[in-house]
Image (cartoon, rainbow, N blue to C red):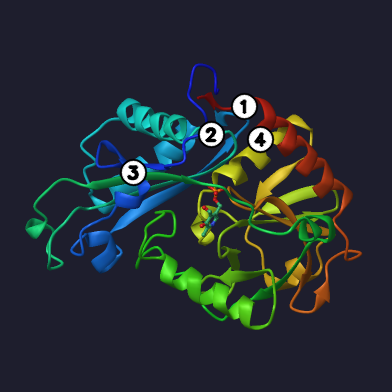
Amino acid sequence: MNEGLPEKPTEQWVHLNGKLTPKSEASVSIYDHGFLYGDGAFEGIRVYSGNVFKLEPHLCRLYRSAQALDINLGIDHAQLQNRVVETVRANQLESGYIRLSISRGVGLGLDPRQVAAGASIIISTEQLRLYPQEMYDQGLDVITASTRVPPAVCIDPQIKSLGRYVNNITAKMEANRVGAGEALMLNMVGNVAEATGDNVFLVKHGEIITPPTSDGALPGITRQVVMDLAKDMGITCRQLTITLYDVYNADEAFLTGTAAEVIAMTKCDNRRIGDGKPGSLTQRIINAFRAITAVDGVKV
Ligand SMILES: Cc1ncc(COP(=O)(O)O)c(C=O)c1O
């Protein structure tokens, strides 16, 4: 992707409301609704070897979030896709992370009629590695957070909204306090919804199970990739309600997310899951995931 481009830029660029802006100058208004009220949504997207991975599904999910929040982005998929690609190109990002954040716009007061300009749309890129390699080798030690995923009648967890993440951050702090790698979050009836930044999968009797979005799981892009890979590999994958009992008694477990990718969960609430090591089916999924990220995506 570096062909014809100058040497790696020292300045990084942010796509700020339609304009590539030096990162050092990129800022949002103190009255941006995202900042004031968490009134917006976002996507975290990966670039692997110069390919933006699953860009279209990420953009579709963002538009679904915007539609649910009644935020008009003012640009269509193709234009937004161009902006993402332009940002990655400007930063000559070969592999890394794209953060695409939107908010309703700028205006003091929660009444959306006081939001003057159009939606804020901000695209930036970063280098990223979420967990140290040893955690991928050994698997994650996870706890169950006391902080719950809100029910869909309050703020639908299918919306990747900025505001809902106060809950996830609180749950993450619970994990941090006890030195755990992640926290599982339950829904209001006590079933497992997801982790603070990842979807949850269990392996039982050679089959894969993940909670349905109606139990509070984000419709994760990596989750969908894993479900598709499992199908291709002839592994049955079901969306089923799961309890902590199911987690503790799983043969294997793993988490999926754009940032974490696919990572084994080998301990939960002090219980060893399976034999306490990343399982063989988990490893097969990880290998298949790595293989697809190496070839799939929108070329930059
Ligand atoms: C709460 C939550 N669940 C699940 C995921 C995984 O989703 P994806 O695979 O689309 O990154 C994320 C990350 O975006 C998340 O924040």
Between disc 1 and disc 4, the foreground one is: 1
Between disc 2 and disc 3, the foreground one is: 3
Quickly name the residue at label 1. Answer: 296
Instruction: From the top left corner, tell me how far across and down residue 192 is, in percent.
Output: 61, 67
Quickly name the residue at label 4. Answer: 228
Label 2 vs label 3: CA separation?
26 Å
Q: Quarter of the image for the N terminus: give it.
A: top right
Label 1 neighbour load within 10 Å: few <14, some 14-19, many 20+: some
Amino acid type indicated by mark 1 = Asp
Element class at badge 3: strand
Label 1 vs label 4: CA separation?
14 Å
Element class at badge 2: loop
Label 2 vs label 1: CA separation?
8 Å
Quickly name the residue at label 3. Answer: 22
CB of mark 1 within 8 Å of CB of mark 3? no
Q: Earlier in the sequence, mark 1 or mark 4?
A: 4
Q: Earlier in the sequence, mark 2 or mark 4?
A: 2
Q: Is residue 66 visible?
A: yes
Callout 2: CB less than 8 Å from ligand 1:
no
Instruction: From the top left corner, tell me how far across and down residue 251 is, in percent.
Output: 85, 59
Label 1 vs label 3: CA separation?
29 Å
Amino acid type indicated by mark 2 = Lys
